[in-house]
Amino acid sequence: MYARDPYTFANASHVPTDVLRLITTILKSWDQATTDYKYTTVFHPHGILHVAPEPAVGEAAMKRLHDDMVHPINGPIVALQHYLDRVFMLAGPPEGEKTEFVSTGKLTSVLKSGEEVTSDYATWIVASPDASGELKVELLRVFSDTSELMKKIGAMMAAKS
């Protein structure tokens, strides 16, 4: 889709290294159909991953969310690929306790039926240092029009029954 590594932002040279580490760790791990769950390591213990109607809070809920959506055999999604566009750093409080940014890109989902759906997305992330000073995610909220994806999943499930 792009003439560059899909996990490289067009403006990566202007983005703090810690921010790039958070995003790429999450997406490279999340995109694995059989994931290593490494994405959970960059969240605070009670971090929130909000990609579905109900947010997933904490590691166990995040793992369950991934495995219910993405599975190499059971589906409904059998493969994913994020393509990163840009990162926009947001102004934070003067004390600098939190780092906020929005990233944009495209996501291609491959369904168990073999159909592919590509959609645009924006992700808002709020991060703060943990006790050791390492930047960790408090909140990750995805904004995307998933209507085509949900329609195709619904049709696939209806055809199965």
Image (cartoon, rainbow, N blue to C red):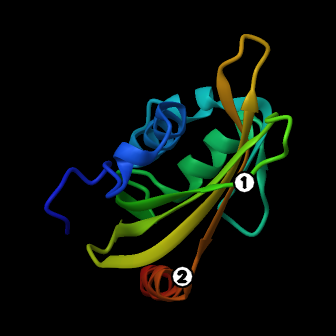
Residue 130 versus residue 26 in the image, above or below: above
On screen, residue 27 versus residue 122, left or right, reads: left
Q: Quadrant of residue 86?
A: bottom left
On screen, residue 53 versus residue 147, left or right, reads: right
Mark 1 residue element = loop
Residue that carries the numbered disc 2 in the rendered image: 150
Residue furthest to the front in view is 94
Q: Position of residue 125 (x, y in %)?
A: 67, 51
Residue furthest to the top in view is 132
Q: Which mark is residue 79?
A: none
Do residues under tags 1 and 2 come within 8 Å of each other at their CB atoms?
no
On screen, residue 119 versus residue 56, left or right, reads: left
Residue that carries the numbered disc 1 in the rendered image: 91
* Mark 1 surroundings: few (<14), some (14-19) or many (≥20) residues within 10 A: few
Q: Position of residue 136 (x, y in %)?
A: 68, 31
Question: For the residues marked 1 and 2, what is the alpha-carbon distance in whole angstroms?
Answer: 34 Å
Residue furthest to the left in view is 3
